[in-house]
Amino acid sequence: MTETPEMTRKQVLQAEMVLLRQEHRDLDAAIAALQDTLNVDMLTLKRLKRNKLSLKDKIARLEDAITPDIIA
């Protein structure tokens, strides 16, 4: 029988971080496009910016989980 290789925890976190970074870039593009319109929906713009900030926080937590603490 052939075993399927399992991903390590670090690989899973890295894959999740790649997805979150892509979503962050997509939100950035959506925000820029919305700001370029004449009638900007401020509520939608605020929601997109809040989601983008939330993603940034999640990415930072994942980076902290991936990078080991080095005690000098």
Image (cartoon, rainbow, N blue to C red):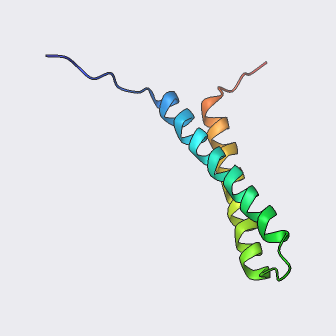
Q: Is residue 53 visible?
A: no
Is 35 rendered above or below residue 38? above
Is 70 rendered above or below residue 63? above
Image-quadrant location for residue 48: bottom right
Image-quadrant location for residue 53: bottom right
Q: Nearer the viewer, residue 51 or 41?
A: 41
Q: Nearer the viewer, residue 70 or 42?
A: 42
At horizontal 76% and vertical 66% (from top left) the residue drawn is 49
Q: Is residue 48 visible?
A: yes
Image-quadrant location for residue 46: bottom right
At horizontal 77% and vertical 82% (from top left) the residue drawn is 41
- In the picture, which quadrant includes the N terminus? top left
Is 41 rendered above or below residue 72? below
Residue 18, given in percent of the width and then of the height, sits at 60, 39
Horizontal side of residue 17 vs 54, given as left or right = left
Residue 57, given in percent of the width and then of the height, sits at 70, 52
Residue 10, given in percent of the width and then of the height, sits at 52, 28
- In the picture, which quadrant includes the C terminus? top right
At horizontal 82% and vertical 74% (from top left) the residue drawn is 37
At horizontal 19% and vertical 17% (from top left) the residue drawn is 2
Q: Nearer the viewer, residue 47 or 54?
A: 47
